[in-house]
Structure formats: C-alpha cells, structure tokens
C-alpha cells in the first residue's frame, strides 16, 4: 500500500493530522506533509480513515 | 444487505459519490446506481468558488472519480438523469429515464441558490457550468456587483478583486456571515474586505434595477444608484426537495432525519439536503458544508454495511478570502461572542477586534464554558487542532 497526497488540493483542514498523527502533519500554512509513505497496521488503518474524511479528497491510499 | 441488494444514490454530488465509494470499500458487493441531473460526472463544489473561479484549475481537476475509477468501484453513474418522484412504500425512484427500484436509497440532491426576486438575471453559482460562466465574466468585468453577505458572496468578491475589477459587495443585513459561524466574524470580514479594496454596501435594500449601457444599474431603497457590468446574486440556498413533495417523507427545511441519517425505512439522506437531528438541540438542522456531506455519507455507508452507529459529524468549514485562510469547526451560538483561545470569557469584546490579517484561534463557548466551536483565522495548524480536540470532547457526540 502507498499513501499519496495532493498538496495543491489540500485545504489545510487538518483532519488527517488529527486522525492519523503518525502519518500526516501540517506545515506552517496548514498544508499536508507526509511523515511515512508506506504505513502498516494501525497507521495504515488511520491513514485510510484520514483519506476517507479528507474534505478536499487530497489523500489516496492505494494498493501497489 | 446482500450481494443481491441494490443501493440507489440520488445526487451525483460529493455526498452521493462518497456514500457509493465507501459502501464498496467497506465490502458491499451488490449493485450501486448513482443518479445525477447534470451532464457532468460527480465533482467537488468548494473549488468552484475558489480554484475554478480563479482559473487555476480546469474542470477535470475538481472531478471526484474518473470514469475508470467508477468502473473499478463498480458504480453505475447515470448523468443527465433527473429524479422526479419517490414511492417509499414501493421502494421506487421515478426518474426522467424510467423507474428505478432500490433496497436502500440515499438522498443527496443538495441545495440550490435562491434566485433574487428583483434580480432574476443575476448570475449565480452552484454548478460547474455556473462557475465557468462566472469565471469568463470576471475576466472582462470592470465593476462587479455581488449581492449577498454570506461566505459565497465574500469568496466571489475576493475572486473579483484578484481579477482586478472594482467590486461592490451588497448585503441586506448589516453583518457579513460565514457559514455556520453566522455573523460572529463579521467585524473581521468587513475589515478584510476593506483592506482589499472591496466597496461594502451593508444594510442595503435593493429596490430594483435597470438595464444600462453595457451592464445594470442597481437601484437601492434609499435612492442610491450603482452601475455594475457583472452582477452575481448569492442570497442563500434552499434544499432540493421538490422531487420528494409527493412522497411520504417528512420535509421541513430539508429531509428530516434522525441522528444517524435515517429518513424512513430504507431511506437515508446526506449533505445539504439532509436535516439530521442536531446532537445538542435535538432539532433537525441542515449543514451546507462539503466535509459534513462527506462525514454523513461515510456514516450512512458504515451503518448500511456494518450496522455501525458512529458519532455525530462535526461541521467543518473552510474558506480563503483575500488570502486569509479561515477554518471553522463545530457549533456556534449566535448569542455568545467568540473568545480568543488563550483567555477566558472576560475578553469576549476583544476577540473580534484584531487586525484582519492577524492569526487567531477563536472559540465559541456555551453557558457552562465548554468549547462548542473553534475558528482558525490564519491560525497555526497545531493551535487549531488543539481547539478542535476540545470541541470533539463533548459527550453529546458519542452514539447513545
């Protein structure tokens, strides 16, 4: 699995950093920063939830 | 539901598309039909008043699913198909392309702008086609009149200034509003617009208009006249429930639902059109924000696939106006002024007084001093997340 973020679509709502703080952070403008691209276990579960809830649909968790 | 069940989603919107996608990702292997009345496949609406209006994105970039993605997910997307009626007893949706039977129905028909009674020719903004027409108008406009003091009015005024047009923002009320935050940010928003050269006419009643050379002359009740060559009216939205009028569903301002989105046996509703029971007031209320539509759609999909009754979605809304990033999370009591995050209720008066560009986290506290809502105004992400966690801590939000 791999996590991909689309930074130009990100609106800085921070849902991802709230739901999956070990996978996502925000820069000073609030834009998403990826902390790990291949999360596993509970991190992967959290990343999947973050992708689902992202209000800008800026996160994809895809099979590799 | 079983693999022989059919879920019909009416409304090819973010709520509809998210519900369909989540059902599939959660293992539902029956049929999913997504019906939309536009010629476009499902797309996101927030970029319409932002990236699309500013010409930064082409329409494709706002699409929710590509054709290939819909096929991969096994979602039968039917565009240019208008739902015209619902028979709850017979589990049947009437459409312009014939009757469609369902086992579970998800209503996601959204809302539409209310036309201005005196300015029916004014442009408005709901669909991709509206946004492209408005973008083209803004490219050549010299003086733009924006009628409506809500967040869309503010966003369009912001876009008009970016295109370099003189901009007149007209509101019937004396305050500017910002989604669920209501008028609590009005003073800041007014300063923000003034700092960016928007002329404001608030508390101004439109009395009529006349076609003038190359544009429109707006006539105000106090006799004032203003010429504009591009006119946009965004004076609020109404839920698109017309097609449900002859059904047995309870419709007030939207489709009345319980706390988990059930409107009737086999019928759920999500997004702008849905009035879910508010966890604090117990009253059905609509929330016109994309993230609310997403969360409600996810909640309904989890309930239909696993029987899960999740926690109540918390309204989350964002905008960018003249470069200021504004996020709002939670619920906002209009009777109680916002307070800054680092101080108690004592500084209620000063919370709205800072310069329009200055970063702030502003809180809405209830009578027991609990945090019910938070606004991040150019806020540091970490600070705003801390405030959000306080909103999320309310025990009313967990399922009962």
Image: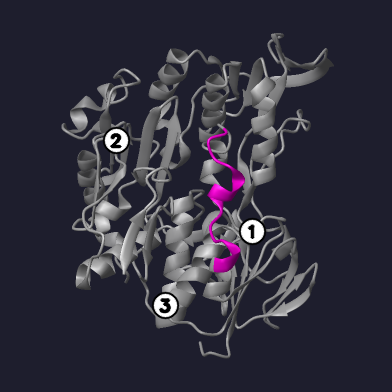
Q: Residues within 10 Å of mark 2 (few under 14, many from 20)?
A: few
Q: Residues within 10 Å of mark 3 (few under 14, many from 20)?
A: some
The residue marked by circle 3 belongs to what chain?
B
Q: Is residue B269 visible?
A: no
Residue B61 is one of the magenta-drawn residues: yes
Residue B158 x %, y %: 51, 25
**Of helix, strand and loop, which one carries label 2?**
loop
Q: Is residue B112 visible?
A: yes
- Mark toward the viewer: 3 or 1: 1
Contact (CB < 8 A) between labels 3 and 2?
no
Q: Residues within 10 Å of mark 1 (few under 14, many from 20)?
A: many
Residue at 73% across / 62% down in the picture? B243
The residue marked by circle 1 belongs to what chain?
B
Residue B54 x %, y %: 55, 31
Disc ID at residue B26: 3
Q: Which residues are magenta?
A: B55-68
**Distance from Cα at disc 2 to Cα at disc 1:** 32 Å
* Direction from residue B102 to residue B347 in the image, left or right: left
**Of helix, strand and loop, which one carries label 1?**
loop
Q: Which residue is mark 1?
A: B41
Question: Is B91 located above or below residue B188 in the figure?
Answer: below
> Farthest front residue?
A64
Residue at 21% across / 53% down in the picture? A35
**Of helix, strand and loop, which one carries label 3?**
loop
Question: Picture quarter containing residue B325?
Answer: top left
Question: Is B271 located above or below residue B248 in the figure?
Answer: above
Q: Which residue is mark 2?
A: A29
Task: State the residue in front, B217 or B239.
Answer: B217
Sequence-first disc among 3 and 1: 3
């Amino acid at each position: 699995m791999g996590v991909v973020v689309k930074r130009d679509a990100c609106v800085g709502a921070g849902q991802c950093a709230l739901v999956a703080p070990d996978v996502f952070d925000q820069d000073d403008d609030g834009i998403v920063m990826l902390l790990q691209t291949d999360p596993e276990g509970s991190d992967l579960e959290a990343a999947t939830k973050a992708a689902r809830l992202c209000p800008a649909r800026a996160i994809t968790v895809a099979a590799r | 539901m079983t693999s022989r069940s059919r879920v019909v989603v009416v409304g090819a919107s973010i709520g509809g598309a998210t519900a369909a996608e989540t059902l599939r990702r959660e293992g539902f292997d029956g049929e999913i039909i997504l019906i939309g009345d536009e010629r476009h496949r499902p797309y996101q609406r927030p970029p319409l008043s932002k990236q699309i209006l500013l010409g930064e994105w082409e329409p494709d970039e706002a699409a929710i699913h590509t054709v290939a993605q819909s096929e991969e997910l096994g979602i039968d997307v039917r565009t240019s198909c208008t739902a015209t009626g619902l028979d709850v007893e017979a589990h049947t949706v009437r459409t312009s392309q014939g009757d469609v039977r369902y086992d579970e129905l998800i209503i996601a028909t959204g809302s539409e702008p209310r036309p201005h009674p005196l300015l029916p020719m004014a442009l408005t903004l709901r669909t991709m086609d509206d946004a492209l027409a408005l973008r083209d108008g803004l490219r050549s406009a010299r003086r733009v009149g924006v009628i409506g003091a809500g967040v869309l009015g503010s966003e369009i005024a912001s876009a008009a200034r970016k295109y370099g047009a003189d901009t007149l923002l007209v509101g019937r009320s004396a305050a500017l509003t910002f989604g669920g935050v209501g008028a609590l940010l009005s003073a800041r928003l007014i300063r923000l617009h003034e700092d960016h050269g928007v002329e404001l006419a608030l508390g101004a009643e439109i009395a009529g208009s006349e076609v003038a050379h190359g544009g429109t002359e707006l006539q105000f009740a106090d006799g004032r006249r203003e010429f504009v060559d591009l006119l946009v009216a965004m004076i609020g939205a109404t839920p698109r429930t017309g097609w449900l009028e002859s059904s047995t569903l309870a419709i007030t301002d939207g489709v009345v639902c319980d706390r988990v989105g059930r409107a009737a046996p086999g019928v759920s509703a999500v997004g702008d059109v849905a009035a879910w029971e508010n966890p604090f007031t117990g009253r059905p209320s609509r929330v016109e924000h994309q993230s609310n539509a997403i969360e409600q759609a996810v909640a309904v999909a989890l309930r239909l696939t696993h029987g899960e009754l999740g926690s109540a979605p918390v309204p989350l809304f964002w905008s960018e106006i003249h470069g200021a990033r504004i996020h709002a999370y939670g619920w906002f009591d209009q009777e109680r002024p916002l307070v800054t995050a680092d101080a108690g209720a004592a500084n209620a008066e000063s919370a709205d007084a800072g310069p329009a560009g200055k970063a702030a986290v502003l809180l809405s506290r209830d009578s027991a001093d609990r945090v019910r809502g938070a606004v991040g105004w150019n806020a540091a992400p970490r600070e705003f997340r801390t405030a959000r966690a306080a909103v999320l801590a309310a025990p009313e939000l967990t399922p009962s």
